[in-house]
Image: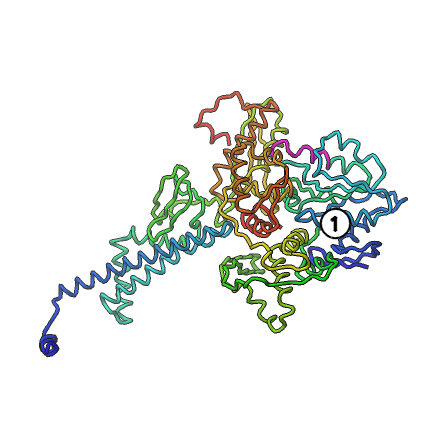
Amino acid sequence: MVISQNKNGQKNQYECFLANDVSLYPSQICEVLTHIRKPGDIRTPPKIAIISPTSFPRQKVSESISREISVLVKNISFSENPVNKEFFETLFDEDAVYICQDCHYLFERNPHGFDLLRFFLSQLVTNSRQVITTWNQYSWNFLRGFLHIERWFPIVIFLPLLSSSELREYLLSLETEIIRFAIDIELDNSLELVRKEFKVEFNSLNIDLSLPYLTVRPRYASKIPLLSDKNVLPEEIIFREIFRLSLGEPGIAHEIFQKGKIDDEVRFSHLPDFMQVPPLSPIDIFILTLILMYEYPVYSRLNQSIHDKAILNSSLYRLVSAGLVTRNDHTWSITPEGFAPVVSYLSQRRMIWE
Amino acid sequence: MNESIFEGVAPTVTTTPSGDISALVLYIIVLYLFTFFLAWLAGKSLQQFSELFSKDRVTIKMLIPLVKIIFYCIATWFAISAILDPSYAETVAFLGLFGAGLGFGLKDLLSNIIGGIVIIIEKPYQIGDKIAFGDYYGEVTDIGLRTTRLVTPFDDVVTIPNYQIFSGSVSSGNFGSTAMMVVTDLFIDNNSDYSRAQMLVRETIASSPYVIISDEFPYTVLIQSFPFYHRIRAKAYVTDHRYEFEYQSDLHQRAWDAMKNENISSPHQVFIPGDYPQVI
């Protein structure tokens, strides 16, 4: 049995026995499996949406679900090849459980750019197949505001960011050898400027105030109690740094962990530095948002939203120069070390939200 | 040797009344110059500091006029103390007479200052707000003791006496937030497909770099029919009120590009500019 907690803090219990080892999100996988109709069950199954900030957790959960389901599973990823309306007309013909991955690729942010998504949603609710869809969290939130997309999906499952201890457990579970940790540079324990918010709630007046303020703190002060046990210190410091850089996102954390690993030793000096986002224009911010929302967009997709190639190229140049965005063959993506600062920066500018 | 000379002279030196007054005047001038500098520095620092925050910029700017008023009140108290060195009873009497004197002689200045205090306490608008005040529309850049300054979309600086707050009405587009609702009208021909036009305008809003669409900041696109045209009214929040005109321009340009591809055209009826407000 797995117990999961939803966003409102209510606990759900699922009778669920997983046949395979699952290192990530077992309760969410169980929740999906409880909604899969057994053979012979004639009721129309609910459409399911699985949401996460990057593709890594969705990919892992989809793979686990595919392994656990005994009936035929058809995997379709919209990130790989462009699709058209004709593709959807026969898509759900076969009797199977469909896992439609990266559905956020079905819309483009331009006029006429939502026709394909509307057609897909229409096809989705007019067939009786079991369909599991996966979406980028920031795209999903945007579509909630624009289309009220949650109306098409009775079951919405968020894959939350991991806590510091969960992240550590997960990263270590992937390693077959014993990993050593080394602080091979002098830690910069200088003061850092931190933005905090002082929240004041007047429940009787239904007013919530949030007063921002800046404060300073020593970067590693919180680790001082650990000095009594020096064997624990390097590992603890490195995992805290990975958590700070990844916000608890397992895919990003895994990449940062791998960057820091030389043979069987994770060295602090090889972890990337925390980045600062330089001043950006509204168009730069918009392009950064698009890259975060699509995860791996190709140039033409960005060009659909910013028609002027000179402006688009100069923005991409600035974002790449700042180390926030990287190019892999034909796709653009947020760098692992850029993820946390970009999320914070775009949230502050209301381009993305929880 | 020298000390003995001064010992003899010093007690005999007396200052003339005019010397006292000059020193006092100089002291007050220096005091106010120093206060002005401090207020300017505090205002500038808060202004710079507020720019570090996007969402909370306006909240921080709210403190600027308050800090300025506190500085000037302290300076005025020091100036009065230097002139009169009053006792409690004298202070009360002075303030009474001073108030009466100001009431008669400087009533405009006084009402401006009271207007400034009312603006700070009641907050009908704050620094950073986009407001329409009388015939003017623009971003509030300063709320002083006597006047409020706006920068209009044409980059004109308008100085409005604070007492006008008592007689005129003020509308604030964002009211302390950086996000602001912008209403944009597009007019299409009666024969055009208005449902499709409405959909395209929706999608244009959703793909604008300047707009927020969320549960907290919903958008809407409304259609109203008139004898010779349909009006499509788009209401959406821009992420920052500074992008108001960029957003409107972007919306017009891309919505019309999309609509022309689907044979949706603007009305043939010629509008007389003066008639425009009447058709809304």
- Mark 1, chain letter? A
Q: Position of residue B110 (x, y in %)?
A: 31, 54
Left or right of residue A34, residue A340 in this image: left
What residue lies at 84% left-to-right and 48% top-to-bottom? A69
What residue lies at 62% left-to-right and 25% top-to-bottom? B193
Q: Which of B29 and A186 is in front in this view?
A: A186
Disc 1 packing (10 Å; few <14; some 14–19; many ≥20) = some
**Residue at numbered disc 1:** A60
Which of the 4 quarters of the picture holds residue B83?
Answer: bottom left
Region of the chain picked out in magenta, as a range:
A110-120
Left or right of residue A201, residue B68 in this image: left
Outermost residue, top direction? B268
Q: Nearer the viewer, residue A175 or B35?
A: A175
**Image height of B229 relative to A226, above or below:** above
Is residue A146 visible in the rendered image? The answer is: yes
Element type at marker 1? helix
Q: Where is residue A18 in the image (x, y as percent from the top left)?
A: 83, 55
Count of numbered circles on the image: 1
Which of the 4 quarters of the picture holds residue B257?
Answer: top right
Is residue B11 visible in the rendered image? The answer is: no
Asked if residue A116 lies in the magenta stretch, the reply is yes
